[in-house]
Amino acid sequence: MESLKIALVSDWYYPKLGGVAVHMHDLALYLRGLGHEVAIITNDRETGKEAELKREGIDLIKVPGYTLGSVGINMSVFSHNATSMIPYIKDYEVVHGQHAFTPLALKAVSAGRKAGKATLITTHSINYENSSAIRALARMTFPYFKYYLRNPHRIIAVSKASKEFIRRFTRVPVEVIQNGVNVGFFDIPLSKEEAKEKLGLGGRVILYVGRLEPRKGVSTLINAMKHVNGTLLIAGQGSMLPLLRERAKLLGVADRVRFLGMVEYSKLPVLYRASDVFVLPSLSEAFGIVLLEAMASGTPVIGTRVGGIPEIIDGCGLLVPPGNARELANAINLVLGNQSVERRLGRLGKRRVERVYDWNVVVRRIVALYREVLDEVAENG
């Protein structure tokens, strides 16, 4: 089939950390792997990915302007007319914005629509983060989002929960296409014991990977450790770090809670493999790519009944109510105390990821949608 020229656009590419950046980067790599011409259009900051993108033949286009650090959005683009983005997207057939509530993605999609391109946007949200600057900004600019979300031909939602949320803003057709994961990257040739030895770990290991922000529910996980015999590894950084350290001390579990800081992506497979159970204790979560990473590693997962998490786990892990430390502790102890449960959940999770969430499967669904929209644009002029 004929290759496509695709622009992936977002404020929330690296160096901003999180699921949007991971998704966008991986999507670019897999699209390129299928032979398509791909560009990443983002803010004018060092991404740390320049060399890799150049090596892979992916263009990196940076849009000048003032980037608001705490939120990661280009405030200059926010104040400009959408047509100011046309020079950046004019050479591409498909303009695909990532994250529906950032100005670079919205205005690029609007410019693409005006220029006769196939336009899509992926929404990674199910609500506004309670304690973040973007919540206040989003509430003030609700009409702004509704206006710009008229422009894409299609919206991709990463979960049914995010589909329901985006419907508050637009009547544009929404299709659920889940995030993907590089299964091969996380399926390393090390046993759990070998991975633990490599990292100098002993005993039972519980793992959390992600940002340390209120909505991630990490305080609940630390509370649960009072009733769990094992070591909790916390990989990530964020505003909650000092409070979480203090909480661990107050509960008397500081000697069994290790804060690892940001762990390089290349080192995550060994960390997942060394862990006996992975926990995502979120209070709010549109998807949760880290669940896919853990499942791809064959590690049993526990998540909360919020947002898109139940859709991912779907009987292949355990679910608990958000914010309930006792229920979470019971679930962790069930996995740690029963090898047959641990092995069964690890096996089921790995099979589910290979069948549904492997990037090789997901990217083809996205490309099929690109072609569908391109056909509509060609037919309707």
Image (cartoon, rainbow, N blue to C red):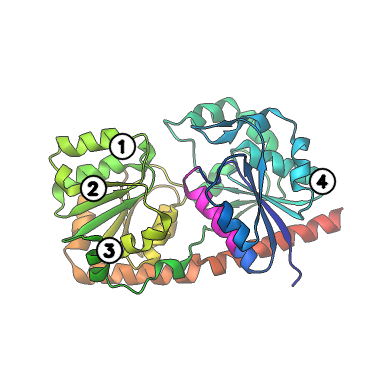
Query: What residue is disc 3 on?
Result: 274
Q: What amino acid is found at the position of numbered circle 2 in the picture?
A: Arg
Query: What residue is disc 1 on?
Result: 241
Q: Nearer the viewer, mark 3 or mark 4?
A: 3
Residue found at x 60% / y 57% = 53
Q: Earlier in the sequence, mark 2 or mark 4?
A: 4
Seen in the picture, residue 236 relative to 201 is either above or below; the reply is above
Q: Position of residue 107 (x, y in %)?
A: 70, 38
Camera-side residue of 171 and 282: 282
| Crowding near the residue tagged with mark 4, few <14, some 14–19, many ≥20 C-alpha atoms within 10 Å | some
Camera-side residue of 76 and 118: 76
Q: Earlier in the sequence, mark 2 or mark 1?
A: 1
Q: What amino acid is found at the position of numbered circle 4 in the picture?
A: Ala
Seen in the picture, residue 156 relative to 372 is either above or below; the reply is above
Q: Residue 115: which disc?
A: 4
Which SS class for mark 3? helix
Contact, mark 2 vs mark 1 (Cβ under 8 Å): no
Magenta span of residues: 16-29
Q: Residue 258: which disc?
A: 2
Q: Nearer the viewer, mark 2 or mark 4?
A: 2
Q: What amino acid is found at the position of numbered circle 3 in the picture?
A: Ala
Q: Position of residue 372 (x, y in %)?
A: 73, 61
Q: How far apart are the alpha carbons under marks 2 and 3?
A: 14 Å
Q: Earlier in the sequence, mark 2 or mark 3?
A: 2
